[in-house]
Amino acid sequence: MLKKIFLSFFLLFLLKTENVFSQENEALFVDSLLENGHFFEAAIAFERIIFEAKNEETDLKTNALLKKSYAYKSLKNFEAAKTALYRIPLQNYGDSVQLLVRYEIALNAFLNKEFGEAESQFVQLNYFLKDKKLLETTWFLQILTLNELKRWDEAKVLLEKYLEKHKMLQQN
C-alpha cells in the first residue's frame, strides 16, 4: 500500500515538473549522465530527446544521436553506436559534420572488426567532402584499416604521407 502511495506521488511530481524541465535543462542533465559514466542511462535519455524533438529540430536530433553513439561506444556496443550515427541526415550538413559522423562510423566499424565498412566510409568522405584537406585527419585510421584489409602497399603510401606531414619521416 505504501509503495502505491509513493508511486502515485512520484508520478504526480513528474507530471507537474514536466513543463519546468525544459529541453535545454534535460540536455544538460543527459550530458551529465554521459560525463559521469552512466552510459546506458544516457543512451536511453538521448533517445527520449530525439523522440520528443520536433521534425524541424534536426540539429538537436543530430547532437543527441551523436552523443547517443558516444554512450554506446563507451559501452563497447559498436553496432548500436553505428546504428545511431546512420540515423543522422548527412544531406543537411556541410563538410565538418560529414567528416565527424563518417569518421565515427568508420571508427565504430573498425572497433567492431568490420574493416570493409570502415574503408567504405573513407571512400564516401573522399567523394562527398568539398575540402579534401580535411581528409588528412582520417589518415591514421585509414592506415590501420588498410593494414587490416591486407592492402599494405596503399597503407605504406598513406603512412609515408602521414609521417611526412607530421615531420616524422627521416630522409636518407
Image: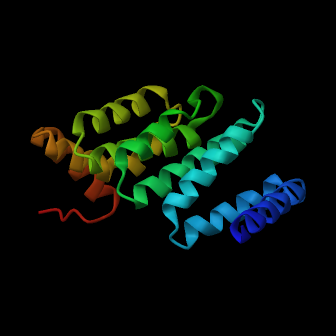
Residue lying farthest to the front in this orientation: 1
In-image side of 96 versus 167 (left or right):
right
Q: Residue 76: which quarter of the image? A: bottom left
Q: Residue at x 49, y 40 (%)?
A: 85
In-image side of 8 versus 77 (left or right):
right
For the N terminus, give its image quadrant: bottom right
| Residue nearer the viewer, 158 or 47 | 47
Q: Residue at x 21, y 52 (%)?
A: 160
In-image side of 171 versus 123 (left or right):
left
Q: Residue 52: which quarter of the image? A: top right
Q: Residue 15: which quarter of the image? A: bottom right
Residue 95 coordinates in the image, percent (x, y): 56, 37
Residue 25 coordinates in the image, percent (x, y): 79, 61
| Residue nearer the viewer, 156 or 67 | 67
In-image side of 25 versus 110 (left or right):
right
Q: Residue at x 41, y 51 (%)?
A: 137
For the C terminus, give its image quadrant: bottom left
| Position of 41 relative to 142 (above/below) | below
